[in-house]
Image (spheres, helix red, strand yellow):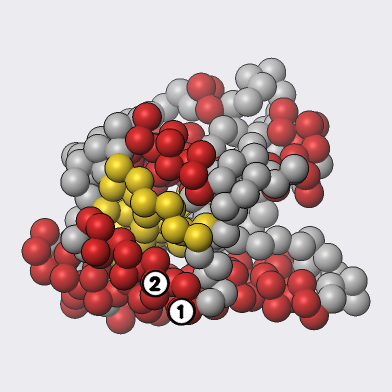
Amino acid sequence: MSLCGKTLFITGASRGIGLAIALRAARDGAQIVIAAKTAEAHPKLPGTIYTAAKEIEDAGGRALPCVCDIRDESQIAAAVSKAVETFGGVDILVNNASAISLTGTEATPMKRYDLMHGVNARGTFAASQACVPHLRAAAAKHGVAHILNISPPLNMETRWFAPHAAYTMAKFGMSLCVLGMAGEFKGDRIAVNALWPRTVIATAAVRNLLGGDAAIRGSRKPSIMADAAYEILGKPADVTGNFFIDDEVLRGAGRIDLSEYAVDPGAKLLPDFFV
């Protein structure tokens, strides 16, 4: 299986899990559309669409950096149009961009609520809507196209809603897109799946918002999500509507020892939300 020559449109690909997925695909010679907001360096968030583009090209891929706020459907449309103009189409959409605030109902300003729902649920829907015509064309040509959402299994337990209802609703909105679109586009041979980590992943968001260095030590590297995504994106069109967990995907592919992904092999791994 190879992603050579495939075009991936990845939201939020300037850093973290999105960039890791891009770099894994780039090693095959894939073409990556980096659809993200960060054009200038942020003091707490390393990486821009341009530094990501350089890393992708250094890894063997082709890169198209696009400044794109996925809350704005006109910016999505412009980025998709540029992708088609540059690379001839879109074979894979990875809905990775996300906003998080682990706050209770009274402590969540409506501006933050709107941000999470605008990026997570609405942004995923809008990016999918814009890419579907091109994914349909790719599937007609190659037999399969993919949408992969970085979102959790739909675990409807109070414990996942009570501490941060707004965030959970926004992330589950991404997963509901999987549930609906997998059925809607099955006949078009567009596989729609979700991928979520078993453990916390070492990203800037974790360092800045979810526990700092202590949380990082108990995390796995973003490369585990990239390798799991790579396995999913090589599957046929009838593998659709699934809520995959990263380590289960890799073990299913014969990877038993996952110790290489631990940031600190001596630290206890911290479980992620929703699993």
Q: Which residue is mark 2?
A: 78
Residue 257 location in percent, x, y?
46, 23
Q: Are marks 1 and 2 in contact (CB under 8 Å)?
A: yes
Residue 220 location in percent, x, y?
59, 33
Query: Mark 1 packing: few (<14 Cα in 10 Å), some, or many (20+)?
Result: some
Q: Quadrant of the N terminus?
A: top left
Spatial CA distance of label 1 from label 2 is 6 Å
> What residue is at 39 percent from the left and 75 percent from the top?
77
Residue 240 location in percent, x, y?
31, 64
| Quarter occupied by residue 69 | bottom right
Task: Give the amino acid at mark 1.
Answer: Ser
| Nearest to the observer: residue 141 or residue 191 | 141
| Nearest to the observer: residue 70 or residue 269 | 70
For residue 182, the mark is none
Q: Which residue is mark 1?
A: 74
Secondary element at image label 1 = helix
Task: Give the amino acid at mark 2.
Answer: Ala
Q: Residue furthest top?
A: 266
> What residue is at 53 percent from the left and 27 percent from the top?
261
| Quarter occupied by residue 191 | bottom left
> What residue is at 56 percent from the left and 33 percent from the top?
221
Relative side of 183 to 212, left or right: left
| Quarter occupied by residue 9 | bottom left
> Residue 239, relative to residue 48: is it above or below?
below
> Residue 259, relative to residue 85: is it above or below?
above
Secondary element at image label 2 = helix
Residue 215 location in percent, x, y?
76, 36
Q: Residue furthest front?
A: 40
